[in-house]
Image: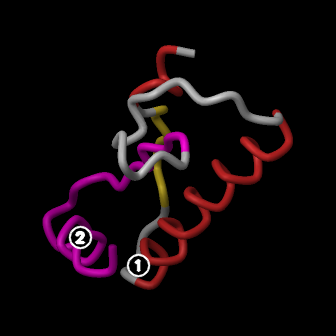
């Protein structure tokens, strides 16, 4: 993430988080039943992690887009 954020800032590309279900084997494409509070926490964690690297590179997360099954939900 550090390398990608630094490259984005250098090239003037906006940094965005593509958040999804915690589903590594299925790449976030499988529908998963979540407690709504746990899902909010997972999404905040993903955005926060990327935003920390974006800020270290001199920018911030500019947009959020759900990925895979979360987008379809």
- Give the percent coordinates (x, y) of residue 44: 68, 54
- Answer with left or right where residue 22 lies relative to residue 30: right
Would you name the residue on which mark 2 appears? Answer: 4
- Closer to us: mark 2 or mark 1? 2
Q: Are marks 2 and 1 in contact (CB under 8 Å)?
A: no
Quarter of the rendering occupied by the N terminus:
bottom left
Question: Which disc number belongs to residue 45?
Answer: none
Q: Is residue 53 magenta?
A: no
Q: Tell which of 1 and 42 is nearer to you.
A: 42
The answer to whether 28 is drawn above or below residue 58 in the figure is: above
- Answer with left or right where residue 51 lies relative to residue 39: left
Q: Tell which of 7 and 71 is nearer to you.
A: 71
Question: Which disc number belongs to residue 58?
Answer: 1
Q: CA distance from mark 2 to mark 1?
A: 12 Å
Disc on the earlier residue, 2 or 1: 2
- Answer with left or right where residue 1 lies relative to residue 41: left
- Give the percent coordinates (x, y) of residue 41: 76, 52
The mark total stands at 2
- Residue placed at 54% from the left, 41% from the top? 21
- Give the percent coordinates (x, y) of residue 48: 61, 65
Q: Quadrant of residue 36?
A: top right
Q: Secondary structure at mark 2?
A: helix
Quarter of the rendering occupied by the C terminus:
top right
Q: Tell which of 34 and 14 is nearer to you.
A: 34
- Residue placed at 22% from the left, 65% from the top? 8
Q: Secondary structure at mark 1?
A: loop
> Can you name the residue that lies furthest to the left here?
11
Q: Tell which of 70 and 14 is nearer to you.
A: 70
> Which span of residues is magenta-colored?
1-21
Q: Quadrant of residue 18?
A: top left
Q: Is residue 11 magenta?
A: yes
The answer to whether 10 is drawn above or below residue 61 in the figure is: below
């Amino acid at each position: 993430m550090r390398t990608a954020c630094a490259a984005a800032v250098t090239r003037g590309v906006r940094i965005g988080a593509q958040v999804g279900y915690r589903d590594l084997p299925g790449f976030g494409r499988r529908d998963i039943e979540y407690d709504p509070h746990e899902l909010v926490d997972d999404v905040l964690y993903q955005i926060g992690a990327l935003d920390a690297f974006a800020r270290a590179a001199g920018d911030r997360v500019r947009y959020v887009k759900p990925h895979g099954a979360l987008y379809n939900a």
